[in-house]
Image: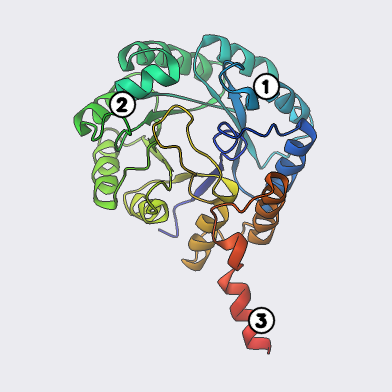
Amino acid sequence: MEDRKIIIHEVGLRDGLQAEKTAVPLDEKIRWVDMLIKSGVDIIQLGSFVNLDKVPQMADTDKLFEHYKSIKPTMVILSGLVLNEKGLERGMACGVDMFCMGVSASETHSKKNTGMTTSEALNRIIPMAQQAQKAGKQVQVSIQSAFGCGFEGPIDEDKVIGIAKEYVAAGIYNISLADTAGHAQPYQVERLFGAIKKLNSEVKLACHFHNTYGVGLTNCYAALNAGVVSFESAIGGLGGCPFTKLPAGNVSTEDLVHTFQRMGLRKDIRLNILIETAKTVSQFFNRELPGFILKSGSIVDFQKAESRS
């Protein structure tokens, strides 16, 4: 496991904010992104290119990417979510490094989120992903509601694997399974990721877990054991899809990094800056966020302090 590079993909600026009612000014978003860059996380998702009437928090996504177009450090990748061809065109114009796009395995969620069936969305996403790849962009495709749906309940695992097969057949190998409703459990996580890993040796696995029922970190550990290399999380545990039945926050980035560091992984990430960022976000919204480490602090720091006393 030590030989495998674990990637931290921070999605707080997108998934974390999309259900928030309080608008975050562009200058404040830049302040948060600057802190996240200093922390050493690998990928930061700045926003999504979506209908602004449905998700007004994403109104300044283009401006945010434009801001970092010429000043972004080379060690960080800036990602953006797109749902359709117009969003892809906008992302291309403002300098997105990595395009994230996908379909939902739940027909109900797919209709609410995109206005399309799963099949209709897949027929649009695959050509978009191929277009972005041809343009030299990094691409990650996802399967949302992969582990269950708040509207439909359990999702047929064969359907999830079938969508992944379509991606692989199209030459798209960076595949994320998203637990949009937070229904995943560890055995299911290992089983599904294990099946998709077997599709092709070039497949690179990513995961995105919501903490609806309190098992997000447990599922991340199961994903790690199943060969997942990229982990999506949100600062402070922000988040929740506004188009699912019971929106709940993502796995907290500082909680995830703290867990990995106690396992001897990703010790290069500056956890203290992640905690500081989470506290800054909490102060902005004037409420306590779901993350644990921003409240308790790092157990490693606590142990160091105890040893000095």
Which label was assigned to residue 240? none
Question: Dot 2, crowdedness within 10 Å: few (<14), some or many (≥20)?
Answer: many
Q: CA distance from mark 3 to mark 2?
A: 48 Å
Q: Secondary structure at mark 3?
A: helix
Q: Nearer the viewer, residue 90 or 16?
A: 16
Question: Pointers 1 and 2 in contact (CB under 8 A)?
Answer: no
Which quadrant of the rendered structure holds the C terminus? bottom right
Q: How much space separates mark 3 and mark 1, taking CA atoms?
A: 44 Å
> Residue 205, how many percent across, how many down?
39, 39
Q: What residue lies at 30% left-to-right and 20% top-to-bottom? A: 107
Sequence-earlier tag: 1 or 2? 1
The disc, 3 or 1, on the residue closer to the chain's N-terminal end is 1
From the image, state whether disc 1 or disc 2 is nearer to you: 1
| Kind of residue at disc 3 | Ala
- Corner quadrant of residue 11: top right
Count all numbered tags in the image, as a single digit: 3
Q: Secondary structure at mark 1?
A: loop
Q: Secondary structure at mark 2?
A: loop
Asked whether, in this view, residue 169 is left or right of residue 51, the answer is left
Horizontal and vertical percent position of residue 154: 23, 35
Q: Nearer the viewer, residue 83 or 200?
A: 83
Q: Which residue is mark 3?
A: 305
Dividing the picture into quadrants, the one containing residue 307 is bottom right
Q: Residue 59 — which label?
A: 1
Left or right of 42 in this view: 153:
left
Task: Report which residue position mark 2 lands on.
Answer: 105
